[in-house]
Image: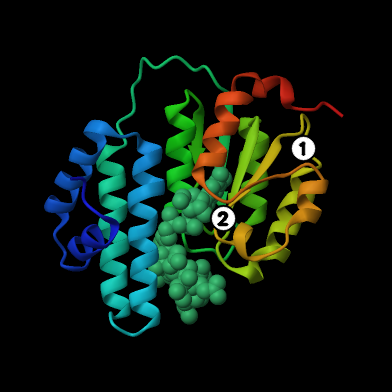
Amino acid sequence: MAIQPKELAQLFLEGKDSEALKEVQTFLENQSKKDLYHGLLTPAMIHIGELWERNEISVADEHLATAICDFVMSAVDIRKESMSLAGGQALVLGVEGEQHHLGLKMSASVFREHGWRVHYLGPDLPLDHALAAAERWSPDVIGLSASLAYRVPALRRYIDAFRGLQPKPVVFIGGRVVGITDLSAFEQEGALLFQDLSGLERWLQEEGGTAHYAKSAT
Ligand code: B12
């Protein structure tokens, strides 16, 4: 039977990086990357958060778990040079101040799995640098990630700034913030909200191939 999220979380907390990687590789023998992120790594990290909240683990434990989770994700994220670029180009980043980055990194991997070219700019990217990168790459999609409710004003600033880009990219918003705050105003302005990676995968399968045409010149 495949390893369960709480068992994997325990390996993270015990610092067993090689064992964790072995378990993840075994999981991937029968399941997709999206399943790994959605069904195993995310619930494992949510469990870590609960233990932390209850003071059953320390901040150092939680940092160790994050680092090993990040390590196993990188270790299995093999990029195939020859993969045909069926999709478009995405820029993914966390808004200024946002340190949570695992979800963002997972979304980058799912884009890649669907043949997209991804510029992963990581968390906590100041707006002027995000804008300069968007002008340089002219992406079809800009994926933003935020975890905490008080990031909504930052999201507002980024979205307003991206609106001035020509051609105009589609803005995706993901991260915990989507499930815990009302972001319908952003949605009404054309941003797409993703609570999880299943929604992203669906979009990539249904619309992703035509994304370059989704960019608006107006
Ligand atoms: C690890 C962690 C940290 C690490 C982050 C390390 C890192 N570099 O990522 C550190 C220690 C830095 C940290 C700091 C803080 N954290 Co913290 N953290 C966590 C923890 C345990 C796991 C986060 C995680 O990686 N989850 C797994 C990922 C994969 O989930 P996700 O981000 O939601 O992403 C999924 C989807 O949202 C989606 N997604 C995400 N981004 C995107 C983007 C796109 C484009 C798309 C399509 C999809 C998508 O895809 C993912 C797939 O499932 C959570 C617990 C939890 N419930 O998540 C707390 C948690 C989020 N943190 C919390 C808090 C309070 C903080 C701090 C404020 C603590 C403090 N006092 O300093 C700071 C804030 C730091 C900051 N400035 O941002 C609280 C938030 C509570 C709240 N009220 O909202 C939580 C819930 C812990 C808790 N139970 O209390 N944290």
191 versus 210 height, above or below: below
Q: Are marks 2 and 1 in contact (CB under 8 Å)?
A: no
Amino acid marked by disc 2? Leu
- Judge left or right: residue 29 versus residue 119: left
Extreme residue in the bottom direction? 55
Give the SS element for disc 1: loop
121 versus 52 height, above or below: above
User: In what quadrant of the picture does the N terminus appear?
Assistant: top left
Is residue 122 in view from this perspective?
A: no
Kindly identify which residue carries mark 1.
Answer: 165
Identified at 61% across, 60% down, the residue is 179
- Judge left or right: residue 155 versus residue 124: right
The front one of 59 and 35 is 35
Residue 149 image label: none
Residue 27 picture location, percent across and down: 23, 40
Identified at 33% across, 60% down, the residue is 44
175 versus 83 height, above or below: below
- Judge left or right: residue 28 versus residue 19: right
Kindly identify which residue carries mark 2.
Answer: 125
The front one of 44 and 174 is 44
Amino acid marked by disc 1? Leu
Extreme residue in the front direction? 1
Residue 167 picture location, percent across and down: 77, 29
Sooner in the amino-acid sequence: mark 2 or mark 1: 2
Is residue 177 in view from this perspective?
A: yes
Color encoding of the figure = rainbow
Give the SS element for disc 2: loop
Identified at 71% across, 34% down, the residue is 169
User: In what quadrant of the picture does the C terminus appear?
Assistant: top right
Q: How many marks?
A: 2
Q: Quick one: label 1, few (<14), some, or many (20+) residues within 10 Å?
A: some
Q: Place residue 211 in its image quadrant.
A: top right
